[in-house]
Amino acid sequence: MFRIAKKDELPKWKSLIVRLTSILFGIVLAGILIAVLGYNPMATFSALVIGAFGSVNALTNTFTIAIPLAITALGLAIAFRMKFWNIGGEGQIIMGCVFATFVSHNMPETTPGIILILLMGAAGFLGGAIWALIPGIFRVFSRTNETLFTLMMNYIALSIVQFLHYVLWRDPASKGFPKIKAIQLQAHLPVLFGVHIGWIVALVLAVMVFFLIRKTKLGYEIRVVGESEPTANYAGINVKKVMLTGVALSGGIVGLAGMIKLTGSVYTLSPAITGNAGFTAIVIAWLSGLSAPVIALVSILIAALEQGSQIIQIKLQVPSAVAAIIQGLILMSALGSEFFLRYRIVYAKQPGKPRAIKRTAGKPDNESGGKPESAEADRSALKGDA
Amino acid sequence: MSENISSSPNPAFSMQGISKSFGSVRANDNIHFQVRKGEIHALLGENGSGKSTLMNILSGIYKPDAGTIEVDGSLRVFHAPKDSIACGIGMVYQHFMLAEPLTAAENIAAGSSGIILNRKKESASIRAFSEKYGMEIDPDKPVVQMSVSEKQTVAILKMLYHGARILVLDEPTAVLTPQEIKKLFNVLRKMRENGCSVVFISHKLNEVMELCDRVTVLRKGQSIKTYVVEDTCSYELVEKMVGRKVDLSIDRPVPCPDCKDCLVVENLSLKNDEGFQKLSDISFTLRHGEILGVAGLAGSGQKELCETIAGIMPAEKGRIFFDGTNIFGKSPREIIRMGVSMSFIPEDRLGMGLVASMDIADNILLKDYSFQKGPFLKTAAVRVKAERIVKELEINTPGIFHPVRKLSGGNIQKVILGREINLKPKLLITAYAVRGLDINSSYTIYNLLNAQKVKDVAVLYIGEDLDVLLELCDRIMVMCAGKVTGIVDARAITKEEIGQMMSGTKLKDIKGGAGNVSNC
Amino acid sequence: MDLKFIIATFLASAIAYSVSLLLGTLGELLTERAGHLNLGVEGMMLMGGSCGYVTAVRTQNLGLTLLAAVLGAGVGALMYAILTVTLRANQNVSGLALTTFGAGLANTLGSTAANTNTPANITAYFTYHPFELKNVTNPFLSFINTAFLSHDIFIYASLLLAVILTVFLFRTKEGLALRMVGENPAAADASGLMVTRIKYMYIVLGGMLCGLAGLYIPLVLQRTWHADITAGKGWIVVALVIFVRWHPIKAIGGAFIFGALSIIGLSIQQFPQLSSMIFFNQYIMVMYPYILTVIVLVITYARKKAWRGPSAIGNSYFREER
């Protein structure tokens, strides 16, 4: 017979251990599954690591993949802090690229590179912001569930880019395979230390987002709104304005991520431009606890997973989809481990006569699932009717 | 330790040596509690004394750390509510455990055995059953459309329908008008005649004295003494409840004789999002240096009134004057800056006033930061303020960086009130400020409010406890379904008259001797 | 071109296409009635589809195929249930994790069956049309025959399932118990219902139905496997559940509408005058189901008194915290 009881807050180092253990657990589970599917887990994992970090080329690729992931995750984190479930990263990346490509197609070829890049950056930001604001506006003014709305916007954006790819922006110069005209040459991002300067943008953004959330009034308002809209209202915060601003920022940063990927490594808009980054970034943001500096770090690790998985497909004929298996299991383990940070199991030899409960007072950080409306405050101890 | 009553005849149930802790909080400490068949037994104690925990153990929700339960002479162990229900124990909670969109019949039938849900048959048998106990409900009405009193009836009926012989009611009168309370008492007496046992959990002495046969007092998790109600009096019970001789009267300083009007509300009307008229033509005046109480059943428009004055909800029409200026239409932030402070303690206590995950300092910041200039947060000055508030109000906390969700109830409400007073408001609106607090903390809050009144602050006090309203406030405004049914001098009105106004009778009709009770 | 014939075949194709949506909706509807929003439908459909299809190719046994599909998806749903019921994790993110994992597993597993087709003996089960009329000359009957009577057992079984689930939900005690758990688990607990067991059961059962939904696409519709074969149907299912207001009978109509809208682009290609217009361009028409979903969402949430689904959805239930 066992039951669950609340636990006090663990000191920071203990919770770190729990989280790291859970990630390890996820990796082990993935390894077992890989073995069951008929591949050699040890060989797979070592090839993954080598494929991601084992050479200058590999490192370059890993960082190149990490940059748009990190920027997207930073953008999503802002929305998540407001409990605005922005699942529309894919669509916002696409629309950021669409807007940026539009600028490139329509600016004269004599435009200096720096101007073009800045304009495209602004366009990318605008594209993503608009795409996020559409569901955002409906959420703010008519309480539409943003989880599904942003998701649908992904598919609409995908259809748009397919339309552009096959019909509207089809490059007349390409014969045979349809393709959109590439962006202008001077818009290609320059390279620093082997990787395009998108990494500088990512770092700067990480610092800026951190600063925004912790040290500015807007960041404070975002955190309060995320915790409880009634409380925010009551404090005089203009919840609508804060939410729209946050959503626009979120979408804009994600759109910018798309533009960076476009001008940094891909150079041509296509329906496959996102590389599933919109969803992967959700995993990153969540695993990082929405914290900007941690996001930067976790992005590199997840990028390593993706880069490595390309290599194992080539070298070991292991399908690259195992990366998704590993990611999924790590995320699930991390989600499950939160439970152990909040509660503990108490074993009772006989019902009614359990062993003494040792820990001292504390109430759990009660995060209930999903909806923002479920303002699940700490009811039991604070009801007073203990 | 309790009186020795283990030799009582026919105990319906008996709890011996019950202990339960949550973390380091010892909610129940070696409690002995025994109820006979065919009696109404009160479990008396103030908020935080352990009553609900004890009853949750009896109903199978919690498992005790130590102690035993006997029902009708046999030892029982409950792993889940259904075990308790199988023994004939039926619990009626403060927050009725009902699924709102479902009908009364569906709620009552849930958990019963059988495969097919035959609606007509269930409805008919429920109707017959309810008439037996003198209760009236419409089984096919969705619970969400019912009044609070009707919902409570459904909850009680549900327990009886499943064969409960022991009924436990957790603070059942908190949400009822005086007239509905009378009806409930009659139902409970009928049950007693039928040989059922009723456990009446309350902190309201007068009700205990009126209704119950015996009473057990809990204090700080321990069972103190069990009395026969006839043999004791309120004074003795309160002393046992609080642990010392307590003067339950509340100070009432003389209101400022020549102060100007602070708040003038004219014809305020409001529809909520769903189209219901939540406020109809509300008009009243509040002067500086006085306390105006607002009485009314939950949902009569108190929340909307607070939010409209504070600018959070826009009213349909009407005018609100604060110190002569029309604040109708101004933003909440502007209104806060003008000197209006509003605090509303909702049922879950953390929803509207505080950010649960942040610490005390960040919560004080909540109303302070908008006065700071520039886009950046300045936290240093707020820290000083927070320290001062903690000291002045004797808030029990390890420090200002302690997360508020870890504070006990009384301290949380002190933080809220402390924060509001820190803003030096001219108008203080406070709703349910003492919700869920123990007596000592409640009196600290009353003293704080009186201190503000003496400083010529205008205080609008919305509360549930009519006794407190009658003692603390200078005047009382009674609301029912969004209308004002009367504004009276607190010294010249009785609880019953307020009760009638809460149910919709207008003041002039009462004074005219009509005394009709009609639900508005 | 015989217009009636084109319409009849269009209806038939729409029905065939929408079976997956119907089954998925029925499954997710059960899960949501228990109070849990499982965004992992896409993942579970892929898991069921890949496990089932690979089993079909390897064993050529229909029974094992169905079992594999049901178990594959069921395991995924079980993972979600453990996370959100026992470990009280955030439901949105848990569902997304399941989708990520499920897609990865499916694509990994499925690549072992690359370049294969559904074995002929299994296809035979689905080419058997129990209600099809032979030798029909009457044009009206012929229309009905082509559109509605020429489907396989799977499709008719799904329709029957919708009816059974409706009766279950609203006319049985067990269905009432499920509804109560989704509306107010505390009330259900206090009524003596076993909340945890009910949640687990219907989350897993719901997942199993999604697995069957996912199986139909590779096994019958396309008769082969390729990566991400469900192409986002799982997400439409999540929207569909809201569209049909968590009601199994309405799921039939809802699935059909979305199914029809999804394939109408292809059918329009047969009319060059129409398909040259941008409104009917095949790439633009692909958007319409999603736009319809958005409209449905906005209307659902804007309605003032609308019941927006089982009230306790999204919340984890913890008895000791009451």
Image (cartoon, coloured by chain):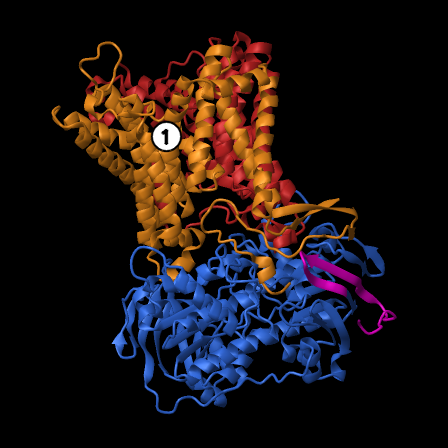
Chain colours: A orange, B blue, C red
**Picture layout, residue C61 above or below residue B40:** above
Q: Is residue C23 magenta?
A: no
* Image quadrant occupied by the C terminus of chain B: bottom left
Residue at horizontal 61 percent and vertical 68 percent from the top: B172
Residue at horizontal 49 percent and vertical 37 percent from the top: A287
Q: Position of residue C60 (x, y in %)?
A: 58, 10
How dense is the environment of label 1, judged by Cα within 10 Å: few (below 14), some, or many (20 and up)?
many
Q: Is residue B22 magenta?
A: yes
Q: Quadrant of residue B323?
A: bottom left
Q: Position of residue C286 (x, y in %)?
A: 31, 26
Taking the view exactly as shown, the residue that stands out farthest to the right is B7
Which residue bears the numbered disc 1? Answer: A67
Drawn side of residue B43 relative to residue C164, left or right: right
Q: Is residue B481 visible?
A: no
Q: Which residues are magenta?
A: B1-30
**Picture layout, residue A15 above or below residue B485:** above
**Picture layout, residue C252 above or below residue B68:** above
Drawn side of residue C262 relative to residue C316, left or right: left
Q: Position of residue B508 (x, y in %)?
A: 42, 86
Residue at horizontal 68 percent and vertical 53 percent from the top: A359
The secondary element bearing badge 1 is classed as helix
Q: Quadrant of residue A264?
A: top left
Drawn side of residue C46 relative to residue B283, left or right: right
Residue at horizontal 51 percent and vertical 69 percent from the top: B390
Q: Is residue A191 visible?
A: yes
Report the magenta stretch's main SS.
Answer: strand
Query: Hey, what amino acid is under mark 1?
Result: Ile
**Picture layout, residue A78 above or below residue B128:** above
* Image quadrant occupied by the N terminus of chain B: bottom right
